Amino acid sequence: MKKLVLAAALAGAATTASAGSLAQPVIEAPVVVEETTSSSTGIIVPLIILAVVAAAVASN
């Protein structure tokens, strides 16, 4: 019984020791997020929406 437990322990240790492969790991390039520096783009969309609403109100 002790030999069976010892064999199981060695088999378990051998599988975890050789779990990796010899291939080189694939490392993905980091994602670069570029932020905008212009503050005018943040005001264009509300101005367009305001113009559309004003045109809709004026047409009624």
Image (cartoon, helix red, strand yellow):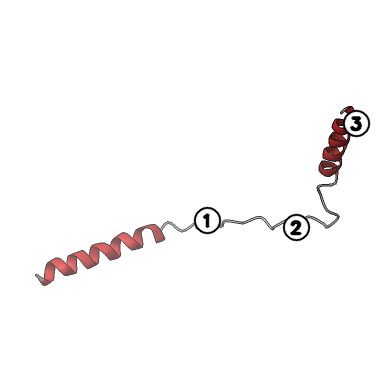
Q: Earlier in the sequence, mark 1 or mark 3?
A: 3
- Whether 54 is drawn above or below 31: the answer is below
What is the three-letter code of the residue carrying label 2?
Val
Q: Which mark is residue 26?
A: 2
Residue type at mark 1: give it.
Glu
Label 3: element kind: helix
Q: Nearer the viewer, residue 1 or 24?
A: 1
Secondary element at tag 2: loop
Q: Quadrant of residue 32?
A: bottom right
- Amino acid beneath label 3: Lys
**For discs 2 and 1, the disc positioned in front in the rendered view:** 2
Residue 35 tag number: 1
Q: Residue furthest bottom?
A: 59
Give the secondary structure at mark 1: loop
At x 69% / y 58%, what residue is drawn? 29
The image position of residue 53, as x and y in percent, is 20, 64
**Toward which corner of the image does residue 4 lie, by quadrant?**
top right
Q: Residue at x 83, y 57 (%)?
A: 23
Please state the horizontal and vertical placement of residue 22, each as a whole percent of the image: 86, 55
